[in-house]
Amino acid sequence: MANLEPYGFPGTLEQLWLERQGEDTFKVSCIPFRVYGLALGDRVRLDPADQQVTELLEKSEHRVIRILLLPTLSDDEATQLHGAIDRAITQSHLKSEWSGDRHIAIDLPPDRDLDTVWALIRDAAKDRMIAWEWGDVEQFQPGDVK
């Protein structure tokens, strides 16, 4: 789990998939949706008592971009944009995870051509269809691990 309290979500945790690397060290093996400063492949330390990430040990070269399809879109518009995003991700050979039908996190590995995805994001943001952010606009903070 990652504590989301440092990011304005008191009492909220995000579940992360982790791959054991050592006794208390793990590799992030999912695309984080809400915790800042973590990405696919990062090495972290986990508190064994409460299973919360306590420290970022080593950054991978991956980044995360998060996109929210705005609630002002009709269901049909959201469905069309959802499909366009999926096609751009597939064409660019990227990994992504949806949370519901309007929130997506996309893994951006180093040295990957992002032109197709970036053009879609840029145009959809300009047309006020999405809100987006980089997952590393803030550093990882463990919060108060109890």
Image (tube, rainbow, N blue to C red):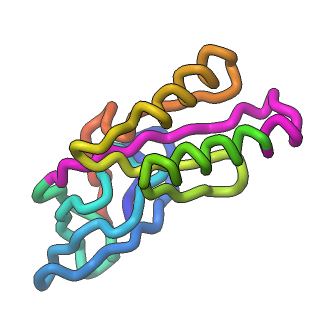
Quadrant in which the C terminus is drawn: bottom left
**Residue at position x 57%, y 30% from top?**
120
Magenta segment? 59-79
Residue 27 higher or lower than 131, as above or below: below
- Give yes or no for residue 69 being in the magenta stretch: yes
Residue 55 higher or lower than 127, as above or below: below
Q: Nearer the viewer, residue 13 or 94?
A: 94
**Residue at position x 44%, y 47% from top?**
92
The picture places residue 102, in percent across and down from the top left corner, at: 69, 45
The picture places residue 51, in percent across and down from the top left corner, at: 33, 76
- Give yes or no for residue 15 being in the magenta stretch: no
**Residue at position x 70%, y 47% from top?**
83
Q: Nearer the viewer, residue 4 or 86?
A: 86
Q: Nearer the viewer, residue 116 or 130?
A: 116
Give the farthest residue toward the front: 91
Left of 69 or right of it: where is 146? left
The picture places residue 126, in percent across and down from the top left corner, at: 61, 14
Residue 26 higher or lower than 56, as above or below: below
Quadrant in which the N terminus is drawn: bottom left
The picture places residue 2, in percent across and down from the top left corner, at: 37, 60
**Residue at position x 25%, y 39% from top?**
139
